[in-house]
Image (spheres, rainbow, N blue to C red):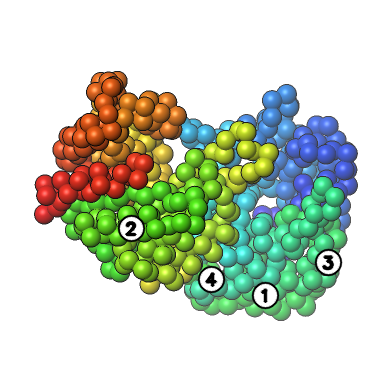
Amino acid sequence: MTIQEYLKERPLLFDGAMGTYLAERCPELGEMHCERANITHPSLVKEIHREYLLAGAAAIKTNTFAANCQMMEEGMPAVSDLIRAGWELASQAAQEEAGTHFVFADIGPVPVKDGQELYDAYREIADVFLSCGARCFLFETMGSAEALAEISAYIKERAGDSFVMVSFAASPEGYTRSGFLVKKLFWQMQQCDTVDAVGFNCISGPKHLLEQIRSLPPAGACKYLTVMPNAGYPTMLGNRIHYGADREYFGQNAIELLEAGASIVGGCCGTAPEDIESIASRLTREFIDGIYKRQRASVISSGQESGRPPGKRVLAKESGEDGSSISGMDNGRNAFAEKLRGGRKVIVVELDPPVEPDIDFFMEGAARYKYAGVDAVDIADCPIAKARIDSSVLACKLSRELGITAIPHMTCRDRNINATKALLLGLNIEGVNNVLTVTGDPVPTAMRSQIKTVFSYNSAILARHIQSFNQEIFAENPFMVSGALNINALNFDSQILHAKRKIESGVSVLFTQPVLSERGLGNLRRARKELPAKILGGIMPVVSFRNAAFMNNEMAGIEIDKEIMEKYRDKNREEGEELAYRISVGIIDKISGSVDGFYVITPFKRVELILRIVGYIKSVYGK
C-alpha cells in the first residue's frame, strides 16, 4: 500500500521525538548525539521504534535527524554508517510489527559553511538513504526553503515512487529561526511539484500550531498538510530539559489539528509513546468515517480529485506569500529612503552614544548636524562591547526632540529575537523606521566570565526577521534595513557573498568601513558593480599619527595605507586636523562616483571638523 492509498482511508499518525525520549530512557548517554546510539545502543533505539509502533504510529522516523558532516564531531563513526544503522533499525522494527507501517528517512537542517552548497550536503545524505532502499523522506525542522526544491527533484529523479515531506520549525509567532515567515515558506513549497506534503513542527506546542494552520486561507494549496508539535513547553529539571504536557491535552489538540485540515500528525520534542497513544485512541472509526472522509469528499467535490492529494485541507496564497515582500525603501513616510530612492546623495553622520547619563554633547552635536543639512544620524550599539546608552533609546529621543532621522545600530550580540522584536515594536511606534543590522563586536576575553554574549543569529538573519515583521506587523510603516560592508577585508570575495546574502535577506543600504587605503578604494568600486544595493562610503577622519596607528592595529575592519599614516608624523593638533580635512575631502572625491551617499564618523567629539567635511559635501554634491 502506498502512502497516498493509505491517506485516502485514514490520517497518517507519526511517532514522537526519538532524541528527547532516548535521553529520558537512558540518562547515562549524557550529551552524546542521539544518532550515535544507532551504533552504541542499537537495541535501545530499535526498542523505542517498537514502542511508538505499539502505541499506534503508522510511520516512524529514522534516528538520523542530525546525521550530517557538519553536526557530527571528530572521532565519531562515519555519517554514512550512522545513517545505514539508523535505517536498518527502523526498518527491522517496522517489519516485525503487524500492520501497515512506513519508515521515513529523517533529515534535519545542515549548517553549511560559506562556500559550501547546501544542495550537495543534502544529496550526500539522500544518496545513502536511497542506497538503503528508502522511498519516504522527511526534511524536518527547516528554517528556510533553500535547496529543498532541488533535493526533492533529485530524489524523485532517482526514485519516482518516493514520497517527500517538508516541515518548517514554526515559532508561536509564525517565524522560523532563520527569520522567514512560515506561511510564506508554506506557500513557496506549494509551487514545488516534487514535494508531496508540507507543514510545521518543533518550537511550538499543539495549540500554537493549531492557530498557525487556522490562520492559513481556505483555498489554493495542493499538498498534504503535516503538523508535529512539541509536547508543550520545556522546563529545566536539574540539568535536563523536561516536557511536562498533559497526555490528554496533547491527544485532544492533535485531533483538533486533524479537524482543522491536517492529514499527517505526530510529535516533536518531548513527545513520548504515551502521547502518540493518546492520539491513536481518538482515531475512532466514527472520527475517520465522519470528519476525515467528509474532508476528502469536500476536496473532491471542489474539483481537485486529479493531481491533488485527497483528504487534506486546501490552502491558498496570501498577499506577499508568492515571494514578494514589503520594502522599507518604498516607505513614503521615510524621508531618508525617499531621498535615496530619488538618486540624490545622502549624508549620514555617526555619533557614539555616551557612557554616562550626561548627553548634552551628544544632543548638541546631533542638533548642529541637523542644521548643517545632514540627512541622518546613526548611533552605534555599544561599540567594542562596552556598555553605553542604548542606541534605540537615543534614536527615539533624537526623532522626538530634534525631528532628525536617526538610525540605531542593532546588534545580534546582546538580545535574542524576542527582545529584538519587542525593541522594533517600540521603535516603530516612536516613528523610527531605519535600522542598521550588525553582528556586533565580541566581548573582550577578560570580561567573558562576567558578560555573556547571545549571538543566536547573525546580521543577515536579523535583517530577514525584520523583513518578515515588515510584512506581518509593520506594513503601514516598514523599516528600511541597512547593513555593513567591510571593504578592507583581505578576502573580499567572501564579503561580496555575505553582502549578497544580506541583500537577499532584505538589506537595502550598505554602510562601508572607512576608505583609507587603495585596497578599500578598489573593493568599493567592485562592490558598486556587483551589489544591487545602495552604498554609503565610509569617511573617518584620522586626526593624528597615534590615532592612525591605533585604528590600523586595534580597530577591526579598518586599514590605513602607510603613506597616509606617515603624513601625520610629528603633526600637532591643528596641523593634524587640517590634514584630516584635506585627506577626507580627497577621499570623498575619489569615491563619489561609486556611492549613493557618505557615511561620516565623528572622531573624538571633533564636531567642528565633521561640520567642515559636511559643508564640503553639501557644496559639491548636495544639488
| Distance between the alpha carbons at the discs numbered 1 and 3 | 19 Å
User: Marks 1 and 3: CB-CB under 8 Å?
Assistant: no
Please state which of residues 521 and 264 is positioned toward the viewer in this rendering.
Answer: 521
Question: Is residue 620 rendered to the left or right of residue 11?
Answer: left
Return the disc, 1 or 2, that comes first in the chain's sequence.
1
Can residue 508 be seen here?
A: no
State the SS at label 1: helix
Q: Residues within 10 Å of mark 1 (few under 14, many from 20)?
A: some
Q: Position of residue 210 (x, y in %)?
A: 65, 70
Spatial separation of the CA atoms under disc 3 and disc 4: 27 Å
Name the quadrant of the C terminus.
bottom left
Identify the disc placed on residue 216: 4
Tag nearer the camera, 1 or 4:
4
Q: Quadrant of residue 213?
A: bottom right
**Residue located beneath label 2 in the image:** 364
- Identified by mark 1, the residue type is Glu
Percent x, y of residue 524 = 27, 35
Name which of mark 1 and mark 3 comes first in the sequence. 3
- Residue 259 - label: 1
* Residues at marks 1 and 2, CA–CA distance in whole angstroms: 62 Å
Query: Residue 428: where, in percent of width, then height?
Result: 43, 67
Q: Position of residue 402 (x, y in %)?
A: 32, 66
Q: Nearer the viewer, mark 1 or mark 3?
A: 3
**Front: mark 2 or 4:** 2
Q: Of the numbered discs in the image, which one, if any, rests on residue 247?
A: 3
Q: 543 or 498: which is nearer to us?
A: 543
Residue 235 versus residue 259: which sits nearer the camera?
A: 235
Image depth: mark 2 or mark 3 in front: 2
